[in-house]
Image (cartoon, helix red, strand yellow):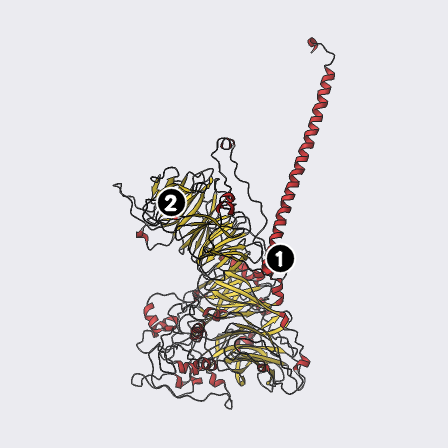
Amino acid sequence: MKKFNIRKVLDGLTASSSSASAHPGPNQNDVIQETLQSEHFQLCKTVRHGFPYQPSSMAFDPVQKILAIGTQSGAVRLFGRAGVECYCQHESGAAVIQLQFLVNEGALVSALADDSVHLWNLRQKQPAILHTLKFNRERITFCHLPFQSKWLYIGSEKGNIHIVNVESFTLSGYVIMWNKAIELSSKTHPGPVVHISDNPMDEGKILIGFECGTVVLWDLKSKKADYRYNYDEAIHSVAWHHEGKQFTCSHSDGTLTTWNVRVPTKPVITITPHGKQPKDGKKPEPCKPILKVEYKTTRAGDAFMVMSGGLSYDTCCRRACLTVMHGKSTAVLEMDYPIVDFLTLCETPYPNDFQEPYAVVVLLEKDLVVIDLGQIGYPIFENPYPLSIHESPVTCVEYFADCPPELIPALYSVGSRQKRQGYSKKEWPISGGNWGQGTLSYPEIIITGHADGSIKFWDASAIMLQVLYKLKTAKVFERSLKGAKEEKQNTEIVDEDPFAIQSLSWCPESRMLCVAGVSAHVIVYRFSKLEITTEVVQLLEVRMQCELNDVDSPDPADHPPTPSTPAAHSSASPSQERDPFETQQSTTDEGPRDNVPCLKVRSSPLKQSPGYQVDLVVQLVWVSGEPPQQITSLAVNSSYGLVAFGNSNGLAVVDYLQKTLLLNMGLSELYSPSEPYQRQPRSPRKTRQPSGALSDNDGNNAAEEKSNKSPTSGSTSPFNSDDEHKQQRFIEKVMSKSRRFSKTVANDFDAKDSFSRSRSSSVTSIERESREAVSSIHFMESFPRKTDSSASPSLWVGSTQGTLLMLALSLPPTGDQRLQEPVGVSPCGTLVRLKGGILTMAFLDSLGVIVPPLYEPWSEPNAPDEEKEKARRRRPASPAPTQEGQDSQYAVVCSEKQAKVLGLPSQSHCFKHNITESSFVLRADVVQMTAGLCLACFCANGHIMTLSLPSLRPLLDVNYLPLTDMRIARTFCFSNLGQALYLVSPTEIQRITYSQETCNNLQEMMGELFTPVETPEAPNRGFFKGLFGGGAQSLDREDLFGEIAAGKASRSLAQHIPGPQSMEGMKGAASGVVGDLARARIALDERGQKLGELEDRTAAMLASADSFSRHAHDMMLKYKDKKWYQL
């Protein structure tokens, strides 16, 4: 067969690894024409959803109605109307300390903690940096950009203020030095600049706030301080009154001081909003610092004063609060998380007019809240953005593209009843931008499992994200706090989040959902549009245990010896449904816990709302003092009515229609006696180590996190050491927390002395490594035996040792017989063994088209019996071609190291490809692209690869992530049509595409942030103010700050770095030109409309004048010949 070259990559893949061996018979390439080529693939990020992780700053454009949020990792998230979002990233990764919009100009200034200032162009769908200014000698502490000004004030840690021209991004020679701003008699440095603002009524005067408590009113023209205002406490923020005659400062002792501009000696008003006022006239008790204050006036009523912080110290246990003072009323609004920043949204962008505030945007550490100031009680707006992904930590993610079209409306209809009430009735105020015009749209659903046991369904169609429905699995269990400490001592696997979702299996067509939790429980759900009350939750307890030489025998002095029967007999029978009180009784025995589940199923009636309703709960029980092993693989099939799951103790198959256990066997028992892959017996353990110990090959113990804890535990932050150390730490975490890896992968990292594995309660790392676990399960209508002439129901099981096992299923006819006659399960031995644990498998027909598992179309489970009988129709299997000597199916199997394609029923090896030598595959899926099928793989070294099917030709290999962290390893998943996603931070989902078609259409699909909008007219000065003065005083800053007047700034102070002169920059410029043309066109249209109105008025005046002339002439003729006494 023809060999294919593979691109050179870091992990040393070679072209020889794509060699294949064809089985006897016709060449597959003669039968299956592969249509996918390398040009069909391109990797790029599409959109990022969720709340910005670790936010640090915020800004709002009051004309464009766009919100910007900066983060501690250098990211900037921009939000417009629902569905208009954008993500930008500074290359340095330094924290964004401040953001400033060039209002209605389509530009944004960002100041970073590394003392750099950047100008972003927002007039293109993907914003880009136009200019960067990097300060060398001074630390940036505060920035201020006046409305409709091109001069940016930058305050420094040294107390100086520099001025930057935002058009050219060059420094002015005009500098306000700290020693000139403060009094000459002052002997101490005033500290960093914490505030800069210009007087709303006089642009020539700016207010400078120093940390020490000194505020200076600086005259830009005369270059000197007009007034200095001193206060004993440190300043955090300053707010002007719109008339420019007073300003308010917030201080570190919880006080607010209001100053008259012309009276610098003492404040006019000093209040402590949350301080206790003593009766003897003394100063009130100090409170926590007021971190920010804003003063906004209204034309019709009292002004609003909004502030964060300032609570008294005796309320230290209270949550963070936002205080709104309006007239004589004070409202304290408690927040769920600490406040990072807040902004008051006003009707006008002009600071010298009545502000008319209507909302407050509050940026919290883990949420974004918008408060309506116009309604009584200050209700919040309903947030249209998908910012609640992290409401509980995400533990697993699944992605389904190209779903049945009726699914999203069905989920939305049941989810709409779960919405909270009491929101503001007004429209969401952040309403800027326009939606994209992309034509690529198909139903996409993302499912997230969470640490609190909840599952969320999201509509992810057309690069948007909207929550559809939320399911709470914890409702099935009792939430008893009594005896919680004793339970924790005995049940290690449920220490932190006992209801956390570990994995799920979902059939979109039948809407069956199966969920596995960390407490070794499986819940089967059916979808219903009707509300029901379940009197008794159906419970099935399963006792899964490994071979006898893997289980510690109890001391014969205390307990009778264990009968020496095969493990199959001791674990194959299902336990009887037991009374919950009986279970509770067994936990109080002094002996080892046995036959006791980790969680107690609810005993009272369960009211189930429309949506997903529990059908069956399966719980693994403790075995001789050993907790049940966590479930490593799970699959459900609606056509067969079966659920299969496995762990390190073996495989279990449950009939959820009859509520019975069909199979419970160790993996070694599924091998044939003559199996070449059968494992050799191991010597039993001699000693039992204490719980939680670690055993490495060299005998050293390492204090690693226990693998039996919740998936939410452990570090989720990026590592900060060198790359080699990062890679080692990541591998250790993957080994101990992500899932059970194969011995092959473990040995790869043992050789590098970088592999340290944690262990379960009493099994050493070596034994845990050698124990084979179920890693993949697949139901399929296929050929489990070589002698099969037609496809039949079967179950395919992959293990962490790379073995693919087959089981034949014997199903009774549909109808009443299916509910009464037992289902037969018979092992058929091993098909193949691969290097590394098996991750995924799929089946193709003789033409190379994927064969999906059978499913039963959804029907209402709570409908009357007659309708159920009509709907219960098993989908007939498509007849496979039965030509003599030719295979009817191809099985695609992918492991952590390699992929193979085998012909069925002949079980011959058709193709083989070694995916990676030095790393291992974390996630693999067979996905349907527009032009054909491919195998998509994501490796631990950050590579994303695609292989053609069935020939396994390399089509794409991109080093996407230089270093993968634990969170990405756990949540990365592929979907059809070239879509993939992963959890890029604890609060954000990053979606990517590896489809060339999607990349080409991405620009059209993305929304536009900038839209041409007219800036509101400036407030009218009024006749008397214009005549006698007192209105806003303008200033020609060019005369003051330009090079002619101020000279050049020192070159060593800051370095100017132009933005990337790439195609994106050119596109952005073109987009900006288009925006300018659009605005010019709007202006011309408005001018033409005004000219037309003027012409109409002129014509009307001419007609009126002509009519008046005629009437005057008639009057003259009437009285022309009459005498005065005749009138």
Residue 839: percent from left, percent from top: 52, 77
Write down the quadrant of residue 619 in the picture: bottom left
- Local SS, label 2: strand
Q: Quadrant of the C terminus?
A: top right
The residue closer to the viewer here, 256 or 900, is 256
Name which of mark 2 and mark 1 comes first in the sequence: 2
Identify residue type, mark 1.
Gln
10 Å crowding of disc 1: few (<14), some (14-19), many (20+): some
| In the depicted structure, whether residue 523 falls above or below residue 2 | above
Residue 447 located left or right of residue 695: right
| Residue 371 visible to an observer of this rendering | no
Judging depth in this view, the residue of 949 and 153 nearest the camera is 153
Identify the residue under disc 2.
215
Nearest to viewer (mark 2 / mark 1) = 2
Query: How far apart are the two marked residues, 2 and 1, measured between alpha carbons?
Result: 51 Å
Report whether residue 562 is seen: yes
Contact (CB < 8 A) between labels 2 and 1?
Answer: no
Above or below, comparing residue 677 to residue 43 in the picture: below
Q: Is residue 803 left or right of residue 440?
A: left
* Dot 1: element: loop
Q: Position of residue 144 (x, y in %)?
A: 46, 49
Dividing the picture into quarters, in which one does residue 924 lie?
Answer: bottom right
Residue bearing the label numbered 1: 437
- Disc 2 marks a residue whose amino acid type is Val
Could you tell me residue 1083's position as x and y percent? Answer: 62, 44
Q: With respect to residue 92, does 670 lie above or below?
A: below
Question: For the view shown, which residue lies furthest in the left direction?
Answer: 280
Residue at the extreme top of the image, as rendered:
1125
Q: Quadrant of the N terminus?
A: bottom right
Q: Considering depth in this image, is 490 or 718 the residue closer to the camera? A: 718
